Amino acid sequence: MANHREDHATIDLMTTGNAPYVARDLAHVWHPCTQMKDHEQNVPLIPIRRGQGVWLEDYSGRRYLDAISSWWVNLFGHAYPRIIAALREQVDKLEQVILAGFTHEPVIELSEALVAIAPEGLTRCFYADNGSAAVEVAVKMSFHYWRNVGRSAKRRFITLSNSYHGETLGALAVGNVELYKEIYQPLLMDVITVPSPDCYEREAGESWAEHSRRKFAHMEATLARHAHEVAAVIVEPLVQCAGTMRMYDPVYLELLRDACNRYEVHLIADEIAVGFGRTGTMFACEQAHIRPDFMCLSKGLTAGYLPLSAVMTTEAVYAAFYDEYEKLNAFLHSHSFTGNPLACAVARACLGIFREDNVLERNRALAAHMGARARELEEHPHVAEVRQRGMIVAIELVRDKATRAPYAWQERRGLVIYRHAIERGVLLRPVGNVVYFMPPYVITPDEIDLMVEVAREGIELATCG
């Protein structure tokens, strides 16, 4: 009888279609990173009923290949049985407890697992609930560290041009994408910005490594001039994701780690988008064989199933806060859901999948196939570059290939691609004039072929006039 009722409910949902859900949503919901007027004109809202693997399904029964991992978070596809089982098991035991003065097994086991796979020396885990919050923690912790050790003049931060670290005020301040930052500038702390090692800007005949080494001269000079007042340098290792997926060579990180050591400045690695296998290694920093002083993690930490973030740091940093209560040296930052047991249980399950299923090796074959198919677009008259780092591929569109003159942002060429892809059953969300692929790790070669073919069709439509 239960199955009979469920079948009728399914039929009702399918025949109702999307329209009622869209109307109810637009009456009350304010969506992120969106001009809401678009949803009444250019970009029809799509209510999603369920997901399975790399596919999302709306209330009319249409399916969409999730080529962007639902904003870069979903590693193992939707409704992954092992993750769901871990969540179900935990929810029967403990859903939430204050982490101040209390602890629980999921947060202990997750911390042990993270320390086991992180760059050697990152032994302490501080938890928050999203990527921006993790960056806030790292920035505050670095500033506070220098204060605790008697060097309170070190209170500024160095960031790269075109960088993005989140939307809260501290995270926004240490980023540099003007689209997000400019309007809030009066609210933000003053930071020092140096040119990105972005290899799209390399000279003809110059290798990625040569370009990245050359661009490091700006960082070296800035540290030499400002180290006395700088707490930390913050970077997104290897890929500036929200900065149109611009990429650089690991040698830059090697040089930066050495310089931060010499000038006594912390290095904060924002691995929120690039961690957990996205760039081909578990953490992007591994490709430079370095250990940052702070490593910010989120997104793939729970494979997109629940909000959670972590900041990993060293015993030296931890020791600077460890003192008698009366010294008031403790780090008092907190979140209500810090170390949430459900999220920690899910994250622990995700790390188990990496460990038991040889995910990184399997991804190498997928990445090779995705890169080979995407590079077929390099000859397109409006494609300036196809670049790749692991399971991230980006296609840069330009008005003029010879000069690399970009399309004006007002033309919204990416929107043409987005709308075409939706019609063809693929979720692509170009960043400006850059089409990118960042799919779940359970995608198949055939699904990659579909994803790339739909992108090719969209590029043709977007650049034909």
Image (tube, grey):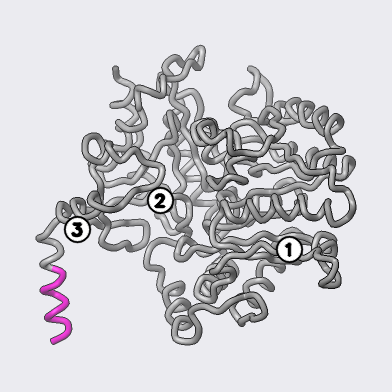
Q: In the rendered image, which quarter is residue 188 located in?
A: top right
Frontmost residue, 174 versus 343: 174
Q: Residue at position x 55%, y 68% from top? A: 336
Is any part of residue 255 visible from this angle? yes
Q: Residues within 10 Å of mark 2 (few under 14, many from 20)?
A: some
**On the picture, is 4 further left or further right than 297?**
left
Q: Position of residue 115 (x, y in %)?
A: 71, 67
What residue did someone put label 2 on?
445
Whether residue 410 appears in magenta in the rendering, the answer is no
- Number of the front mark, 3 or 1: 1
Q: Position of residue 365 (x, y in %)?
A: 52, 51
**What's the distance in space between the residues labelled 1 and 2, CA to CA?**
47 Å
What residue did someone put label 3 on?
59
Q: Secondary structure at mark 1?
A: loop
Q: Residues within 10 Å of mark 3 (few under 14, many from 20)?
A: many
Whether 273 is drawn above or below 411: the answer is below
Whether 114 is drawn above or below 34: the answer is below
What residue did someone put label 1 on?
331
Check disc 1 and give the amino acid type: Phe
Which region of the structure is painted magenta? 1-10
Dominant secondary-structure state across the stretch colored magenta? helix
Frontmost residue, 461 versus 174: 174
Check disc 2 and give the amino acid type: Pro
Q: Residue at position x 30%, y 31% from top? A: 416
Q: Position of residue 67 (x, y in %)?
A: 39, 48
Q: Position of residue 154 (x, y in %)?
A: 82, 43
